[in-house]
Image (cartoon, rainbow, N blue to C red):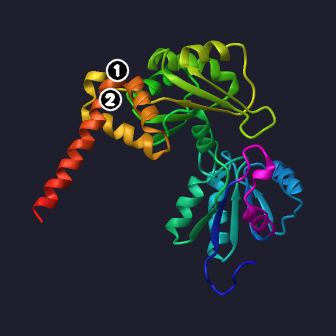
Amino acid sequence: MADVTGTTGTLVLAGTPIGDVADAPPRLAAELETADVVAAEDTRRLRRLTQALGIHTTGRVVSYFEGNESARTPELVEALAGGARVLLVTDAGMPSVSDPGYRLVAAAVEQDIKVTAVPGPSAVLTALALSALPVDRFCFEGFLPRKAGERLGKLREVADERRTMVFFEAPHRLDDTLAAMAEVFGADRRAAVCRELTKTYEEVKRGPLGELAVWAAEGVRGEITVVVEGATDSGEALDTAELVRRVQVREEAGERRKEAIAAVAADAGLPKREVFDAVVAAKNAARTGQEQGKGLT
């Protein structure tokens, strides 16, 4: 319960299942049952979640969504300042990741109030892992603008982004978005559309953007996450060190060297022999450097 000694409370950001309720973090139930205040993006969904978990909230439940974030934040900060433990949950995934939460976190931190989290499922990381695209470096772009012109402008801004990109999109705009991506990034750029992750009708559709755009034109339903391969330089622009680095990244991720070399060569548009020679040369150079170092000791 709220602390009456003057000690400030704690803001807890809790991840909720993105589909399968069985994925709920073990701590989530305990936090829901004991929090002084539960701020929920949708109180009806919260009720369904607690029923599925077989628990009951004992604290005050308030709504906290895009439309009332600005007005509700001071109220919640006041409760925190008074010693309350405030739990923030959104409809699915982690609060403040394309969901309400940022304003409350910023306001709490400004007041030196402790902020912690109950880690939970993430559509961003789940889609990345299932995409079969490089995940050593990635960026999250959230939702693209709804208007066609603004959407094209945003895509042009990231056209040269070399990291794998993750986007959220509404199902009724997916075909237009994929068509715009194919136009800006190129129809051959690899991508994956992840639909209804962890739910009964989960589907991951992988392929070139041009083909995915044609597929989506038939209509797609459900929660959508799109993962797009980052831009790759032409073979001439990649120096030996970069080729070797890319192979090392894939090896560290668990790929065998042969497969890693083949994948890097395909991405760079180079013969496998050229990448192989670069890796061997780097290995020999490293060995020579080590032997020379021993000779100086």
Q: Which of the two residues, 96 or 118, is positioned nearer the viewer here?
A: 118
Task: Report how far apart the C-alphas of labels 1 and 2 lie in the structure.
Answer: 7 Å
Q: Which of the two residues, 131 or 286, is positioned nearer the viewer here?
A: 286
Please determine whether, in this image, residue 241 is positioned above or below residue 182: below
Please determine whether, in this image, residue 35 is positioned above or below residue 196: below
**Residue annotated with mark 1:** 271
Task: Give me the residue at 64% from left, 75% from top.
Answer: 9
Q: Which of the two residues, 171 or 287, is positioned nearer the viewer here?
A: 287
Q: Which of the two residues, 143 or 3, is positioned nearer the viewer here?
A: 143
Residue 102: give x, y in percent of width and height.
56, 53
Label 1: element kind? loop
Range of magenta residues: 16-33
Residue 231: give x, y in percent of width and height.
40, 27
Q: Is residue 80 left or right of residue 58?
A: left
Residue 19: give x, y in percent of width and height.
76, 43
Could one spot residue 199 in this view of the protein? Answer: yes
Q: Is residue 283 magenta?
A: no
Q: Which mark is residue 5?
A: none
The kind of residue tagged 1 is Pro
Q: Are marks 1 and 2 in contact (CB under 8 Å)?
A: yes
Could one spot residue 158 in this view of the protein? Answer: no
Overall secondary structure of the magenta stretch? helix
Mark 2: few/some/many CA within 10 Å (<14, 14-19, 20+): many
Label 2: element kind? helix
Please determine whether, in this image, residue 58 is positioned above or below residue 101: below
**Residue annotated with mark 2:** 275
Task: Give me the residue at 15% from left, 58% from top.
Answer: 293
Mark 1: few/some/many CA within 10 Å (<14, 14-19, 20+): some
Residue at the left extreme, as displayed: 296
The kind of residue tagged 2 is Val
Q: Quadrant of the N terminus?
A: bottom right
